[in-house]
Amino acid sequence: MLGSKERAIGALLLLNLWLQIFDGVATYLGISAGFPEGNPLVAATFHHLGVVPALCLAKVYACGCLLVIWHLRRRSPLVFPALVATAAAYLVGSVAPWGATLAAL
C-alpha cells in the first residue's frame, strides 16, 4: 500500500506531465496565431526541425526529466520539492501567460 507522501509524489508527477502537455499545445496554438516562443532554446530549434517536431522533442525531453526525478523518489528527499517547484514554474511561466494570451484571441 502506498503512503500519503508516495501518493502525493505520484499526483505531482501527473500534474507536471499534464502541464508539459498543456505547454506544448498552448505553445503550438500561440505560435500558429503569430505569437513568439518565449524559450530561446526551443525557438532556435524551430528553424532546424520545424515547430511540431521541435515542440515534441522539447516536451519528450522534459517528461523524461520528470520521470528521472520521480524514479529517485525513494533515494532523495529533494524529489517532492523538485516536483512542486517544477509545477509552480510551469504554472507561472506557461499556464498563466499562455492562458491570458489565448483567452484574448
Image: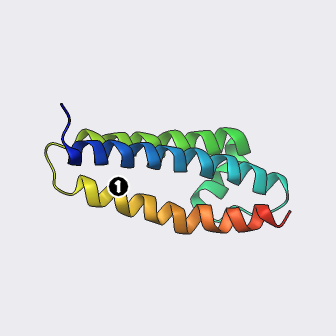
Point 56% across, 67% down: residue: 93
In this image, 5 relative to 22: left or right? left
Is residue 69 in sight in this rendering? no
Q: Position of residue 103 (x, y in %)?
A: 78, 63
Q: Position of residue 34 (x, y in %)?
A: 84, 60
- Element carrying mark 1: helix
The amino acid type, in three-letter code, at marker 1 is Leu
Point 72% across, 68% down: residue: 100
The part of the image, by quadrant, that contains residue 82 is bottom left
Point 15% across, 42% down: residue: 74
Q: Position of residue 40 (x, y in %)?
A: 61, 63
Q: Position of residue 73 (x, y in %)?
A: 21, 44
Q: How is the image coloured?
A: rainbow
Point 66% across, 68% down: residue: 97
Considering the image in quadrants, where does the N terminus appear? Answer: top left
Q: Residue furthest left?
A: 75
Q: Which residue is mark 1?
A: 83
Instruction: Give 55 or 90, whichever is nearer the viewer.
Output: 90
Q: Is residue 52 above or below residue 12?
A: above
